[in-house]
Amino acid sequence: MRIIAGKFKGRRFNPPAKKWPTRPTTDFAKEGLFNILTNHLDFEELKVLDLFGGTGNHSYEFISRGCKDVTYVDKFHGCVAFAKKLSKELEIEEYMKIVKLDVFKFIDICSEQYDYIFAGPPYALPTIDTIPDLIFEKQLLKENGWFVMEHNPNHSYTNHPHLFQERSYGKTIFSFFE
């Protein structure tokens, strides 16, 4: 995995491979997503929430591009430890709040709102289809904010009232909600 643009452009990182509970977004799909985001969002002004943060791939990309307020959430100890280690190496700890907690518990107790929320849940997660509704029920998104959900073709949100765009990169699909 690599950081595509910004201060850390070209920086590569490899999470531990043993029993790693993640499916990182491919560089190809991430590059496509960030091409869209670059044309619509001012990274330096964003308050970002990265759900199912895994390696921290999206969090680092936002901070590399000038974002100074990213909250990363994941429940797996190895993922959280890796994110803490890399945020320290990159000297971005002041910009990245790392929360070790189940995403659904976090959503339930969160009282903040975000300009941009990204969720990259495990595709086989039994409750994956509830995530968009939860984001809007709990009012986690600021007005004019975007929520992007990564999923595969086994899931579709085309009838969701907040969906405004869908982009496919191979078997990776990003659904955009506002």
Image (cartoon, rainbow, N blue to C red):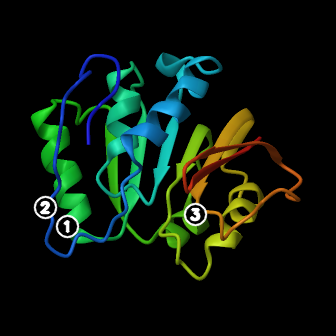
Image depth: mark 2 or mark 1 in front: 2
x and y, in percent, of residue 32 in the image:
53, 32
- Specify the label residue 107 is tagged with: 3
* Residues at marks 2 and 1 touching, judged by CB atoms closer than 8 Å: yes
Q: Position of residue 165 (x, y in %)?
A: 77, 40
The residue to which callout 2 is attached is 16
Q: CA distance from mark 2 to mark 3?
A: 28 Å
Residue at the image position 50 percent from the left and 45 percent from the top: 49
Q: Quadrant of residue 89?
A: top left
Q: Is residue 61 above or below residue 44?
A: below
Residue 159 spot, x, y in % from top left: 88, 59
* Above or below, comparing residue 46 to residue 26 in the picture: above
Q: Nearer the viewer, residue 16 or 106?
A: 16
Label 2, label 1: how far apart the Cα atoms are: 8 Å
Residue 19 lies, with reference to residue 155, above or below; the image says below
Judged left or right of residue 124, residue 136 is right
Q: Which mark is residue 67?
A: none
Residue placed under numbered mark 1 in the picture? 78
Q: Earlier in the sequence, mark 2 or mark 3?
A: 2
Query: Marks 3 and 1: CB-CB under 8 Å?
Result: no
Residue 145's image quarter? top right
Label 3, label 1: how many angstroms apart (C-alpha)?
Answer: 21 Å
Left or right placement of residue 60 versus residue 93 in this view? right
Q: Tag 1's secondary structure? A: helix
Image quarter (top left, top right, bottom left or bottom right) of the C terminus: top right
**Residue under the point 20% across and 76% down:** 19
Tag 1: amino acid: Gly
Q: Which quadrant would the N terminus be assigned to in this image?
A: top left
The percent position of residue 146, horizontal first and vertical second, equals: 68, 38
